[in-house]
Image (cartoon, rainbow, N blue to C red):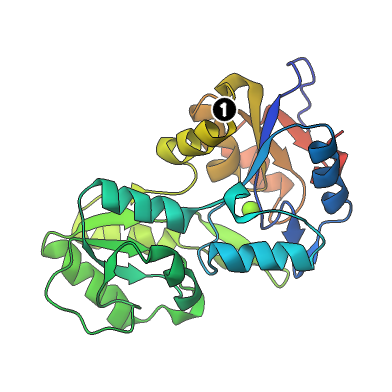
């Protein structure tokens, strides 16, 4: 167990969703109260997620169903970050490899092929790869691979290894992104956590200094290590996919480890 309470208390927080605020179809016990307390004390926070199976509005609805009162502006998703990245790079046509519900957050782009439901019209400017779960097929991997070999830009929403699904660790987007990287010899640009640009955008909206802000999540790499590399504090929760053996084998040293988000005073 790693405890470090020597650092100053953060003046703002970035909070992960799945595994941190909720898990397995319910809020983590005490978590809605934690969010309410942050609001009462006027401590700014943002909810930051690599979950790519739902749109932002669906996430807000889901959070509301679990007892969290949040507005859409307080939620940052990897899908929104990837859309922003693609636009900033000047891409107009992109092939999404993302579940249908999240496509509504990509309206700023012209979607073609992939999971867009529209026939592919030549090689897109970029592919956007998220967590497709059971919808991954050989044909979809092959289509993404062909676009990459034809020069499409490679943007991944996350490179997360696994998440906790119905009590079992389940493959996230990372293994599929890594597979496409391996086959194509290309390296994906990561839009969500742990990318610097994702953390920078979230911080800008908070208006706080990096070292004064703590990212709290259950993913060692995207949440804890990613935040630390971006100059924030990286705090780990022992909920969601947390496993003691994974922490000890990772070489990652969280600034603090909480039994759950509810332990946040
Ligand atoms: Mg998580």
In the image: residue 111, left or right of residue 256: left
Residue found 72% across the figure and 56% down from its top: 240
Reading the image, the residue beneath label 1 is: 207
Image-quadrant location for residue 214: top right
Q: Nearer the viewer, residue 243 or 35?
A: 35
Give residue 161's position: percent from left, percent from top: 51, 56
- Indicate whether 23 appears above or below 112: above
Numbered disc total: 1
Q: Quadrant of residue 149?
A: bottom left
Comparing 193 with 38, the one in front is: 38
Q: Is residue 260 visible?
A: no
In the rendered image, residue 36, in percent from the top left (x then y), is placed at 84, 45
The residue positioned 63% from the left and 64% from the top of the image is 59
- Residue 225 image offset from top left, x and y in percent: 55, 35
The C terminus is located in which quarter? top right
Residue 68 location, quadrant: bottom right
Residue at 76 percent across and 29 percent down: it is 2
Q: Image point 47% across, 37% down: which residue?
A: 201
Q: Is residue 244 visible?
A: yes
- Please state which of residues 130 and 65 is positioned toward the viewer in this rendering: 65
Q: Indicate the secondary structure of the residue bearing disc 1.
A: loop
Residue 165 x %, y %: 66, 69
Query: In the picture shown, does residue 49 fall above or below 26?
Result: above
């Amino acid at each position: 167990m790693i405890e470090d309470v020597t650092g100053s208390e953060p003046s703002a927080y970035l909070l992960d969703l799945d595994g941190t605020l909720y898990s397995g179809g319910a809020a983590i016990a005490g978590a809605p109260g934690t969010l309410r307390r942050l609001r009462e004390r006027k401590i700014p926070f943002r909810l930051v997620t690599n979950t790519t199976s739902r749109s932002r509005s669906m996430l807000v609805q889901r959070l509301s169903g679990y007892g969290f009162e949040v507005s859409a502006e307080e939620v940052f998703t990897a899908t929104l970050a990837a859309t922003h990245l693609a636009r900033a790079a000047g891409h107009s046509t992109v092939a999404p490899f993302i579940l249908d519900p999240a496509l509504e957050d990509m309206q700023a782009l012209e979607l073609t092929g992939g999971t867009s439901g529209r026939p592919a019209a030549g090689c897109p400017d970029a592919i956007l790869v998220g967590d497709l779960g059971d919808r991954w097929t050989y044909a979809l991997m092959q289509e993404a691979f062909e676009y990459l070999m034809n020069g499409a830009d490679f943007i991944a929403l996350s490179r997360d290894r696994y998440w906790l699904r119905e009590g079992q660790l389940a493959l996230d987007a990372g293994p599929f992104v890594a597979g496409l990287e391996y086959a194509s010899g290309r390296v994906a640009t990561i839009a969500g956590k742990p990318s610097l640009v994702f953390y920078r955008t979230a911080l800008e909206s908070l208006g706080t200094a990096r070292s004064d802000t703590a990212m709290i999540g259950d993913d060692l790499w995207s949440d804890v290590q990613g935040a630390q590399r971006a100059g924030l504090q990286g705090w780990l929760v022992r909920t969601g996919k947390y496993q003691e053996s994974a922490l000890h084998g990772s070489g990652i040293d969280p600034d603090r480890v909480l039994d759950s988000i509810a332990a946040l005073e």
